[in-house]
Image (spheres, rainbow, N blue to C red):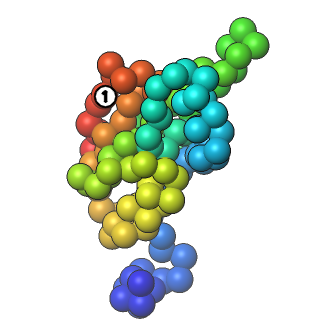
Amino acid sequence: MVRQIVEFGNNARPSLGVNLLDDRAREQYARSLGRPLRGAILAEVVAGSPAEALSLAPCRRRYGSVVLGDMIVEVDGKPIGRNEDLICAIEEAEPGSAVSLKVVRNCDPERLEELR
């Protein structure tokens, strides 16, 4: 961290540009669906962010119910089980470097994609 501050300045922190669904809410959806949801579910994608450039999709409302967004399950080969795992994996990346993501589109286990 000290090396990053010296090299890139105080505010140089890697970011995907997303807000995440709370882990407790994710666990409630998992119980409702009757299947595990291990990862970090996107609640919002910031305009102009790396996440938007990758076409990552957030949760949204449709016909009075919630359609779950994309769920990040791996960063650079490291499994993501909860939000803190994603935050740590992204913060460990060098500012400006590319990371590899494994994403379950709309939390549909049949739609696993690897993005870079």
66 or 37, nearer to the observer = 37
Residue 28 coordinates in the image, percent (x, y): 63, 34
Residue 84 coordinates in the image, percent (x, y): 50, 59
State whether residue 50 is above or below residue 53: below
Q: Farthest right residue?
A: 64
Regarding residue 44, the answer to whether it shows in the image is no
State whether residue 27 is above or below residue 4: above
Regarding residue 26, the answer to whether it shows in the image is yes
Secondary structure of the residue carrying tag 1 is: strand
Quadrant of the image containing the N terminus: bottom left
Quadrant of the image containing the C terminus: top left
Instruction: Please state if 99 lies on the left or on the right of 13 as rendered.
Output: left
Q: Which image quadrant for residue 42?
A: top right
Instruction: Please state if 107 lies on the left or on the right of 30 as rendered.
Output: left
Q: Which image quadrant for residue 99?
A: bottom left
79 or 7, nearer to the observer = 79
Residue 53 coordinates in the image, percent (x, y): 42, 39
Residue drawn at 38 percent across, 61 percent down: 89
Q: How many marks?
A: 1
Q: Farthest top residue?
A: 63
Residue 7 coordinates in the image, percent (x, y): 37, 85
> Which residue bears the numbered disc 1?
112
Residue type at tag 1: Leu
Residue drawn at 64 percent across, 44 percent down: 24
Residue drawn at 37 percent across, 42 percent down: 73
Residue drawn at 52 percent across, 53 percent down: 83
87 or 95, nearer to the observer = 87
Crowding at mark 1 (Cα within 10 Å: few <14, some 14-19, many 20+): some
